[in-house]
Image: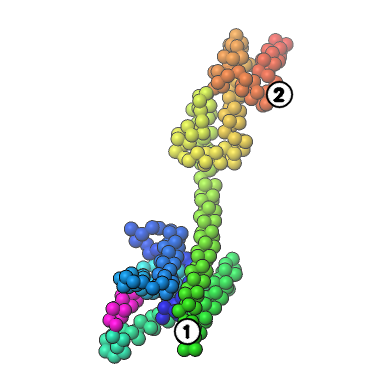
Amino acid sequence: MVSASIGLATVSSAKPPAMPWWPKGEQPFLFLCWALFSVSIAAFVLHQSFLFDVPILGVLLTLVGLIPCGWAWMFARALFREGAHRDLWPWLIIATFYASCVVLYFDGSGSQSGALGYLRQIQGLMASAMLIMTFVETIDGIRRDQAHRKFRLIVAIGFLSTMAASLVVDLPEFAAVQDQTRTALATIALCGATAAFQHRRRILTARANEAAEATAARARPEIAKRLTALLEQDRVFLDPDLKVADIAQRLRQPDYKVTQCITGDLGYGNFNQMINAYRVDEAEALLVDPALSGQSILDVAMACGFGSLGPFNRAFKAKTGMTPSQFKRVHATVAVTS
């Protein structure tokens, strides 16, 4: 049974049942199933590869590597069945199967009759069924799943190839090399499972990123509206020490979302460009106000939120094409002539 179940290592990925204490989402479950399968296979490889003077260690490795076929089935469900992490019933089957394997392992009689004989038959049927279901999970819906058809085919071919080699090596003719071949097949299966896990993890990560970007895109118009209100109504740009983090804190949004809103929805190159645009607009109003004609350029700069004259002059000229002094003279001349 162990040698036959090794082939399913070429599959990978699954997800946890929806329980309050269980990590939610496909990625945590995918990692869990890959880890369970990998540990099971690794225990089998270690047990086959080394001679242990400590009997208890051999027993522990056997118990850990007892049901690779069950973990392979769960792994295949995680790889290819959406929402598998919400199902509890497969775990109940796995638990029952493992319990039967433990009972038969410690029995040691090898009896083919009575209750233990029936249990041994049921165990064999369950192991075969799980191997078959591993393959079924891999190819089920392969025609509809065009995006991952190639991935499914690679996993299916790898699984069948490993299973076929595992069955062949069980023949009496290969008794002399059975242990070494099983160890090699298990190692290959472990590498295949890890490759499949990494591929599926990248798919789930990309999907999660796309979903996060879509959610952020839907939220940005509302953020833009609230940010505009902060600038036009609360006039936060007058604060010379204003930073993106200050805006984000007032909006109760992450810094990166505010930055995305500024460069995306509001169309500014960056945060400083937006703040300077509002400050220059304020400066233009002050410079053409007759009641403030006696104010110096530095006073106007400070009143608009600039910390010094240099940045004010550069920002003003970049927007209007004139220095603040030129702007003030031009508008003063226009006012006199009119």
Residue 148 lies in magenta, yes or no?
Answer: no
Q: Is residue 15 left or right of residue 325?
A: left
Dot 1 or dot 2: first in sequence order is 1
The x, y position of residue 238, in whole percent, is 52, 23
- The residue drawn where x is 42% and y is 74% is 48
Name the residue tied to disc 1: 176
In space, the residues marked 1 and 2 are separated at their CA atoms by 89 Å
State the image quarter where residue 35 is shown. Answer: bottom left
Name the residue tied to disc 2: 321
Q: Are marks 1 and 2 in contact (CB under 8 Å)?
A: no
- The residue drawn where x is 50% and y is 25% is 241
- Label 1 environment density (alpha carbons within 10 Å; few <14, some 14–19, many ≥20): few
Tag 1's secondary structure? Answer: helix
Q: Is residue 210 above or below residue 330?
A: below
From which residue to which does the magenta span run? 96-108
Q: In this orientation, does residue 168 appear? A: yes
Tag 2's secondary structure? Answer: loop
Residue 101 lies in magenta, yes or no?
Answer: yes
Q: Is residue 110 above or below residue 68?
A: below
